[in-house]
Amino acid sequence: TEHRFPRLAFYRGSRKEKGRFFGPYPSAGAVRDSLHHLQKLFQLRQCEDSFFANRSRPCLQYQIKRCSAPCVDRIDPVEYAQDVEHAVKFLEGKNREVVDDVVKQMDAASEVLDYERAAALRDQVNRLKLAQEKQYVEVGSADADIIAVREKNGLYAISVFFVRGGRSLGSKVFFPRPGKAITDQDVMQAFLPQYYLDRAIPSHIFLNIACDDQEILQQAFSDKTGHKVEIRHRFRGERRRWVKLAEANAVQALLTRLASDETMQKRLDALAEALNLDQPPQRLECFDVSHTSGEATVTSCVVFGRQGAIKSDYRRFNIKDITPGDDYAAMSQALTRRYTRLKKGEGLVPDVLIVDGGKGQLSAAKAALDELQVDDVTLVAVAKGPTRKSGMETLFLSGHAQPIILAADSPALHLVQQIRDEAHRFAITGHTRKRDKKRRESTLQEIAGLGPKRRQALLKQFGGLQGVSRAGVDDLAATVGINQELAERVYAYFHGDKH
């Protein structure tokens, strides 16, 4: 807002920066949707200041009527300031005030026979009214959260609708995991204080069921926010319709989750049959090794259960003290570290352990588990087919001489592929980060006299290792902490003389 022509922007972080903040929004999608509507309604710029300052002609946003092009003086600063004021009021929920102001401007333009501007303002009024009809919720201009909890087959879903300034900003669904059989009221009562622990609390919270501690929560929330917070569970009219909508949203989310769980259960049943297990596995772990010609070796461990991926249990292992490129040693080290912890009681032992590879990886994994005396895990290796095409995998089951080849449409194979691909993705992500960091640091570490602080100063000054390698001696010497001699040494290192 300190700029002559303020801009609308997506922002994450603390509110200590200059400007006017609106939110918090339930999701990034809700923010982008709001910015999209505001562009159409008020045509305020969203470009960075550096982009704005270097324009000689309007950009595409002006051509598609999403910006009034203040960068090249296509709009008067006074008119732009009015658009900014209207956008602020709109975000505050003062839609009617905005419409009234624009109507007055339209009438004034008509009186001075500026029919072109009057027509443009008329179209803006129509867009404002349409947006108001689509987004307005009958809670006045207040902020409100509409929360509904529903249960099906022991699974709970909590749907939260967000209303800010009288406008609906979308919704979000949560799936709490109660440890024992409890009521909907218990779930709601446990959810509210946890949910608002580190979130902004609106002035109204509408629930689909009552809470025993409703008055206590209401007082606690009011004390925390410094303004009155109202928690209600009985209403009529429009507010009741929104609560019913939140309930319907929770039910739909439950049905979707249950359908997904059913698919997962079918895959687990099929895998149990394929591996000749007594019952479907409840926990599966998969390991994969990733490196670049032996550099920055990382082994990943991903975990799946009846509900799918359990990402909180994922782990990565930075492999050390092995021959570069020795995948068997990398796998053995990761399994030893992982299952040593599990033997100490620091986690859950899986029913099925999958390793990415063929008979060699299977043997390495079996040796590591035997060393730790882990004998209650079904060990499986997944080898790619001769063409490495998905659907041509071969499974090697520890203790069985013959491999298992599943049909391409087998649910069991689909589950194995899903887990293997997730382990591969997780390993590559970790390896890439480790490799890039090592290359960036180790290259500069080879230069005598260049300590950690000076390396950091160079990387920050030139935006990374590539920028440092391209810099001239004078530019390097201009960096804080780098004298002329050291600058020449850095330059010589990147340009052939590394002595």
Image (spheres, rainbow, N blue to C red):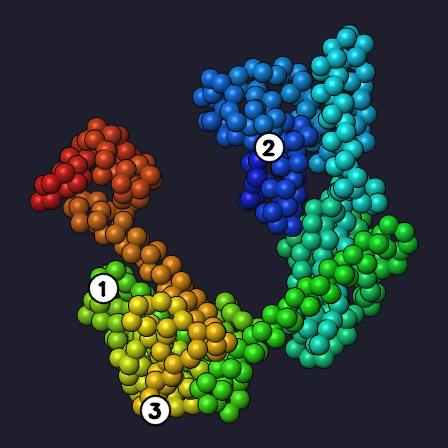
Q: Residue beneath label 3, please?
A: 399
Q: Characterize the local packing of mark 1: few (<14), some (14-19) or many (20 or more) Cα atoms within 10 angstroms.
A: some
Q: Could you tell me which residue is drawn at 60 percent across and 47 percent down?
A: 29
- Asked if residue 256 is positioned above or below residue 373 in the image, the reply reads above
Element type at mark 1: loop
Element type at mark 2: loop
- Asked if residue 134 is positioned above or below residue 145 in the image, the reply reads above
Upstream in the sequence, badge 1 or badge 3? 1
Q: Residue beneath label 1, please?
A: 294
The answer to whether one can see residue 220 in this image is no
What is the distance, in whole Å, between disc 1 and disc 3 at their CAs?
30 Å
The answer to whether one can see residue 360 in this image is yes
Q: Could you tell me which residue is drawn at 48 percent across and 77 percent down?
A: 410
Residue 456 at x, y percent in the picture: 31, 44
Disc 1 marks which amino acid? Answer: Gly
Residue 267 at x, y percent in the picture: 53, 77
